[in-house]
C-alpha cells in the first residue's frame, strides 16, 4: 500500500531553559545548558556508557516474571517502565524529551484490551534516572535503550507507537532494526529534517495572539523558572502547548510531570544540541518498507510539511488527518484517534 514532522530554547534571563513549544516536538529544549556547573544532583550516580544491544550478555538479561511497573536497569541507566494489557506488544515512545509517558497513558490505555502496552520514560526523562554519563547522551543511546528494553522484556517483533520527538526516535530505530518491527504508528512525528522542522515551527508561530505572547513573557520571567521550580516550569510548558491544540483550553487537561531536577536533566541533554541542529533523514528513509501509519491533527502545520515529506519517502505508509485537532489529537478526538489506530493494527 503506498500513499505516499526540536526548535529553539526559551531564554530565561539569559539562561536557556529546557522548554520547547514546536509544531512537532513536545517540550524540553536540549540546546544549551540550563544551569551552571556539571555536578550530579545529590544521590545520583555517574553510570557507564550505553551497552551494545547485540552483546549476548545483554540479550540474556530479562525483567522479573511478575514485572509490571518500576525502574529497570537498561543500557547503563534506569528507565521507568509500565506494562499493561495482553496481546501483540506495542512499545509507546513519548515526546519531549524530558516529559514522561503519563500524558499518553489515559488515552492509549484502551488499546490494552488486545495489545500488550509498554510505556517507558526515556533516558533522563520523567521518573527515569536523572543522571547519566555524558558520553551516553545521544540519539544512538536513546535508540539503543529501546532495543535493550525490548530484549529485557523478552519481546520479539514489536509495534512502535510514538508521539512527536518519539516519532523521530522511532524512525531511527526502524532504520537500524527494521526486522524487529511489525509496524510503526507515528503520531505528529518530528519532521524528518531540521530544515522542515524549522518550517513547521515558523508556521506555528505565524499568527500568535499578542495576549499569548504577553502571558508567555510573564511566565518566563517568574522567579521559579530560573530556579527550576516544577510548578513554574509546568505553567510555562502548559501555556506554550496551548498553541498546539484546536481548543487551547484543552491544554489544562494535559498531564505534565516536571521532576525536581529538571534543569540539571536539561543541562545534560544539552550535549545533543549539535547532533540535532542539522539532521536530515529523508534520503535514508527512501524505500523504508515497514508498514507505517501517520496520524496528525488536521490543524497542525506538521501534516502539510513533515507529513508530506514522509509520504514521499516511505514505501508502505498511510496518512490520517484527525479533524478538529492539533498536535494532541489523542486528547482532543480520542474516539476518532483510537478508531484509526485499531483499524491499522488489526491483523498485525
Image: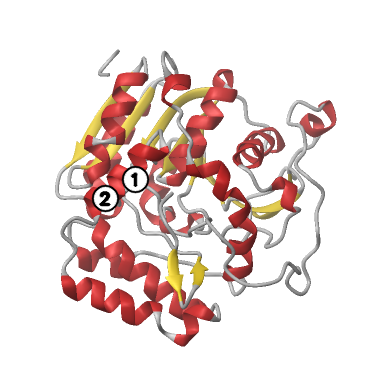
* Residue 337, x across and y down, in percent: 27, 42
> Mark 2 and mark 1: span between their CA atoms?
6 Å
Q: Which residue: 62% across, 63% down?
A: 267
Q: Is residue 87 visible?
A: no
Which residue extends farthest right?
Answer: 57
- Answer with the quarter of the image where residue 246 lies: bottom left
Quadrant of image for the C terminus: top left
Q: Which mark is residue 157?
A: none
- The crowding category of the residue bearing disc 2, from other C-alpha atoms within 10 Å (few below 14, some 14 to 19, many at least 20), is some
Q: Is residue 91 left or right of residue 195?
A: right
Disc 1 marks which residue? 198
> Is label 2 in a helix, a strand or a loop?
helix
Return the residue nearer the eye: 151 or 66. Answer: 151
> Is label 1 in a helix, a strand or a loop?
helix
* Residue 48, x across and y down, in percent: 82, 49
* Residue 210, x across and y down, in percent: 17, 72
Quadrant of image for the N terminus: top left
Q: Which residue: 29% across, 37% down?
A: 295
Q: Which residue: 21% across, 65% down?
A: 248
- The crowding category of the residue bearing disc 1, from other C-alpha atoms within 10 Å (few below 14, some 14 to 19, many at least 20), is some
Disc 2 marks which residue? 202
Amino acid at each position: 500500500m503506498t500513499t505516499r514532522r526540536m526548535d529553539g530554547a526559551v531564554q530565561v534571563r539569559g539562561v536557556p531553559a529546557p522548554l520547547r513549544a514546536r509544531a512537532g516536538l513536545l517540550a524540553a529544549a536540549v540546546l544549551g545548558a540550563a544551569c551552571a556547573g556539571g555536578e550530579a544532583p545529590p544521590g545520583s550516580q555517574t553510570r557507564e556508557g550505553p551497552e551494545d544491544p547485540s552483546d549476548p550478555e545483554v540479550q540474556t538479561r530479562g525483567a522479573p516474571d511478575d514485572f509490571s511497573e518500576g525502574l529497570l536497569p537498561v543500557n547503563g541507566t534506569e528507565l521507568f517502565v509500565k506494562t499493561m494489557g495482553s496481546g501483540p506488544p506495542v512499545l509507546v515512545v513519548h515526546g519531549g524529551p524530558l516529559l514522561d509517558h503519563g500524558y499518553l497513558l489515559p488515552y492509549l490505555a484502551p488499546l490494552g484490551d488486545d495489545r500488550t502496552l509498554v510505556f517507558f520514560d526515556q533516558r533522563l526523562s520523567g521518573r527515569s534516572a536523572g543522571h547519566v554519563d555524558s558520553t551516553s547522551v545521544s540519539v544512538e543511546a536513546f535508540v539503543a535503550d529501546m532495543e535493550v528494553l525490548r530484549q529485557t522484556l523478552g519481546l520479539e517483533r514489536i509495534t512502535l507507537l510514538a508521539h512527536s520527538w518519539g516519532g523521530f526516535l522511532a524512525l531511527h530505530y526502524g532504520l537500524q532494526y527494521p526486522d524487529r518491527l511489525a509496524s510503526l504508528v507515528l503520531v505528529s512525528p518530528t519532521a524528518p529534517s531540521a530544515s522542515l522542522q524549522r518550517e513547521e515551527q515558523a508556521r506555528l508561530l505565524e499568527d500568535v495572539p499578542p495576549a499569548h505572547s504577553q502571558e508567555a513573557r510573564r511566565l518566563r520571567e517568574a522567579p521559579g523558572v530560573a530556579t527550576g521550580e516544577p510548578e513554574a516550569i509546568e505553567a510555562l510548558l502548559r501555556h506554550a502547548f496551548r498553541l498546539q491544540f484546536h481548543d487551547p483550553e484543552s491544554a489544562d487537561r494535559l498531564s505534565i510531570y516536571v521532576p525536581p531536577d529538571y534543569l540539571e536533566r536539561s543541562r545534560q541533554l544539552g550535549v545533543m544540541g549539535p547532533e540535532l541542529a542539522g539532521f536530515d533523514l529523508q534520503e535514508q528513509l527512501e524505500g523504508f518498507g515497514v508498514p507505517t501509519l501517520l496520524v496528525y491533527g488536521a490543524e497542525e502545520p506538521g501534516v502539510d510539511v513533515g507529513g508530506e515529506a514522509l509520504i514521499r519517502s516511505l514505501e508502505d505508509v498511510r496518512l490520517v488527518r484527525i479533524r478538529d485537532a492539533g498536535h494532541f489529537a489523542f486528547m482532543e478526538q480520542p474516539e476518532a484517534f483510537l478508531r484509526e489506530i485499531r483499524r491499522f493494527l488489526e491483523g498485525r
